[in-house]
Amino acid sequence: MTHPNPAAPPETAPVLQAIQLQKHFSHRGRGVVHAVDDVDLVLRHGEVVALVGESGSGKSTIARLLAQLMPATGGELRLHGEDARVRSRRAFRRYVARVQLIFQDPFGSLNPVHTVRYLLTRAVRIHHGRLRGQALEAELQGLLERVHLTPPERYLDKFPHELSGGQRQRVAIARALAADPEVLLADEPISMLDVSIRLGILNLLKDLRDRLRLAILYITHDIASARYFADRTLVMYAGRIVETGDSESVTQDPLHPYTQLLVRSAPNPDDLADRARGARGEAPSLVNPPAGCRFNPRCPFATELCRTELPPFAEVGEGRTVACWGYSDRVDRPVLGDVGEAYGERPTIEVPHLAEEPDEPVQPSGAAAEASVAYGPSAEEGVR
Ligand SMILES: Nc1ncnc2c1ncn2[C@@H]1O[C@H](COP(=O)(O)OP(=O)(O)OP(=O)(O)O)[C@@H](O)[C@H]1O
């Protein structure tokens, strides 16, 4: 199997693109959850885009929409510029071969009763027909080598519970690669792994970005890891993108008051809720989101305008946008004051919490990710 596809458009052309994507869930007949609104997103070959935001901001919903595990309620999805919405199982199978999803919990997404050999063979056959004998063996070995599980013979006949968390995530990635995809959607791929092996998985994904020119969406609540790993970063708050730009600028010179808060909560993102709650209240309900800027109830600089009108994206510098009235030329904008005073001291963003160490086997946690088998064997069975 070769990659990249020789018929693929030039490197910089979008591979997968979401335009004004929207997902509203009905809320037990009592209103609507505005989970995702007006999201624009572009994934290109050889580029990692991070989607960063706190829990409940809509990140996983975007991953599921891009994977077409559920329909959007608005907006468009384009693959190589063409409408990508699938309307049949056959079209879904073709789409999945191009766009693969990796989940948070590699234990939940790998069926524990099957060996690595079985899991990978199924994936290879689903996407490439009935390879057998030497050709199949070579393919399986190649997949494990691509995710640095070497020598491959050591892993092929293991069950998921005989592997460490990091090794399981590598097998999940190998299974995704069996489709020879162009896009990997990685939904919090390291958050359930031991801290000591997170960097190894990010480095592997970087390597795949470079060697296979994969377009990667990296979903995380940890903005520090976005700085390390992603070329571009999109910051999401309460269902909307609020800031975009190259990762270095967004993390080192955050503009939106929410991004400033997020950066201040790094490297311990769990600290954010406490920090923000103490100062400025909780994230809003998405059943009845605030009018205007959704961050306004928490924002130390919010004005009447922020409470009533949705801020448009302002372009600030090369490739950077921010949806905040404080950067708009359209009106008398609010003055953004000292965020340090509002949120406290800003730590330096580093990645010591991602330290790389040998990936030793660990006992299975038993925690299964909800819906995490959707792209695994059982779901693949479902679309055959
Ligand atoms: N099937 C559903 N029905 C109703 N509401 C939903 C459904 N799925 C998600 N939501 C709501 O949509 C919002 C966004 O959820 P989502 O899981 O996308 O956020 P997230 O940023 O990925 O958070 P986390 O990191 O905790 O997974 C939340 O308010 C969630 O409760």
Image (cartoon, rainbow, N blue to C red):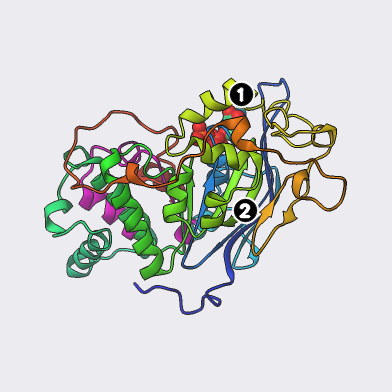
Relative depth, front residue between 362 and 139: 362
Mark 2 belongs to which amino acid?
Thr
Mark 1 belongs to which amino acid?
Ala
Q: In which quarter of the image is ligand 1?
A: top right
Q: Residue at x 84, y 34 (%)?
A: 308
Q: Is mark 2 within 8 Å of ligand 1?
A: no
Relative depth, front residue between 105 and 342: 342
In the displayed structure, 298 sits above or below 347; it is above
Residue 219 falls inside the magenta stretch: no
How many other residues sit within 10 Å of disc 2, few (<14), some (14-19) or many (≥20)? many
Q: 16 left or right of 117? A: right
Report the number of numbered marks.
2
Looking at the rendered structure, the secondary structure element under dot 2 is strand
**Residue 171 image point, x, y percent:** 28, 50
Looking at the rendered structure, the secondary structure element under dot 1 is helix
Q: Do we see residue 19 in this rendering?
A: no
In the displayed structure, 371 sits above or below 132; it is above
**Residue 162 image point, x, y percent:** 16, 40
Residue 112 falls inside the magenta stretch: yes
Q: 209 left or right of 329? A: left
Number of the label disc, if any, that sits on residue 244:
2
Question: Which region of the structure is painted magenta?
Answer: 96-125
**Residue 318 image point, x, y percent:** 65, 65
Q: 20 left or right of 103? A: right
Task: Tell me where residue 3 sits by quadrant.
Answer: bottom left
Q: Which residue is drawn at 69% across and 31% down?
A: 300
How far apart are the alpha carbons under marks 1 and 2? Answer: 25 Å
In the displayed structure, 224 sits above or below 213; it is above
The residue where tag 1 is placed is: 279
